[in-house]
Amino acid sequence: MTTNISPRIIKRDNLKHFVSRDCDCACVASNPLVFSNMSSYIFKDRYKQASNLKSIPLDDRNELYYVVANELRSTDSIGVLNNSAKTILQFTKKGVFPQEVVQEFGQKYEKKLIEDSLKEFFQLGFIQKEKLEVYTTSSIEQNKVLNSWLHITDRCNLKCAYCFLPHIKKDMTLNMGKSIVNSLIKSALSHGFSKIKLKYAGGEPLIKFEIIREIQKFAVQ
């Protein structure tokens, strides 16, 4: 085996991923892939470089890679790769099985080092499984739900110190609510969503409970 500079990946330690949840807050949904032991899954499927992966050269030996939060990840992900790690990552651009990566770079690096690099790439979201079969049934169903927040009113009967809203007397009209529901239905049908989940916010939305009830009734019908 020839002497080569080992792949090196520097990443943030506080990344949280592989959490499946139906969150009622307005944050981006977490990654629905749930693995109790990633090692038992990582080498069974074909992997491809993430389409939203970006990079910024730092110097002639290191490059910063990152992916932004999306429907599959609750956090942005950042990692600095040296040229050796970068070469391995680039090899996955068109989609490969991990065994192919090991075969390609096995003369340069130890097998475990290559496999550990692939695991790091997967954890960071730099590479993704090509087949949707890796998702659990519940996760697939969750991804078919179009979530929408409706800001019913700016009014509120409380005076919370942390609240930033002006609490002016401004409400969503019933006609506007119906128009939004119609737009959501059209969007859901055109983008393959099977369900719509309406969430009501304010102010204190229950002050206008009658509007909420009428919008919900209209949406169900």
Image (cartoon, helix red, strand yellow):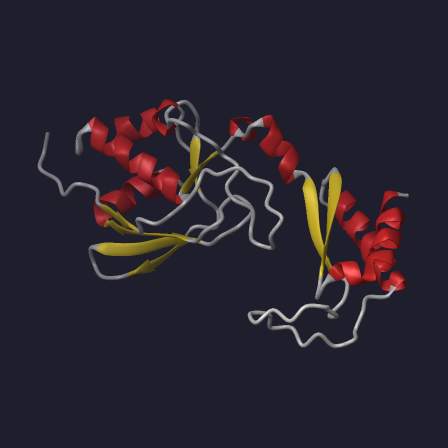
Left/right placement of residue 65 relative to residue 52 reads left
Residue 106 visible in the picture: no
Who's the residue at 81% across and 49% down the image? 186
**Residue 81 in the image, given as x and y percentages of width and height:** 26, 50
Quarter the C terminus occupies: top right
Left/right placement of residue 9 relative to residue 51 reads left
- Residue 63 picture quarter: bottom left
Who's the residue at 71% across and 45% down the image? 191
**Residue 131 in the image, given as x and y percentages of width and height:** 52, 29
How many numbered tags mark residues here? Answer: 0
- The residue closer to the viewer here, 164 or 182, is 164
- Residue 59 picture quarter: bottom left
- The residue closer to the viewer here, 81 or 92, is 81
**Residue 122 in the image, given as x and y percentages of width and height:** 38, 38
Q: Is the residue 190 above or below the residue 33 in the image?
A: below
- The residue closer to the viewer here, 104 or 23, is 23
Quarter the N terminus occupies: top left
- The residue closer to the viewer here, 27 or 104, is 27
Who's the residue at 43% across and 50% down the image? 53
Who's the residue at 53% across and 37% down the image? 20
Q: Is the residue 106 above or below the residue 26 in the image?
A: above
**Residue 5 in the image, given as x and y percentages of width and height:** 14, 43
Residue 63 visible in the picture: yes
Left/right placement of residue 184 relative to residue 5 reads right
Q: Residue furthest front?
A: 158
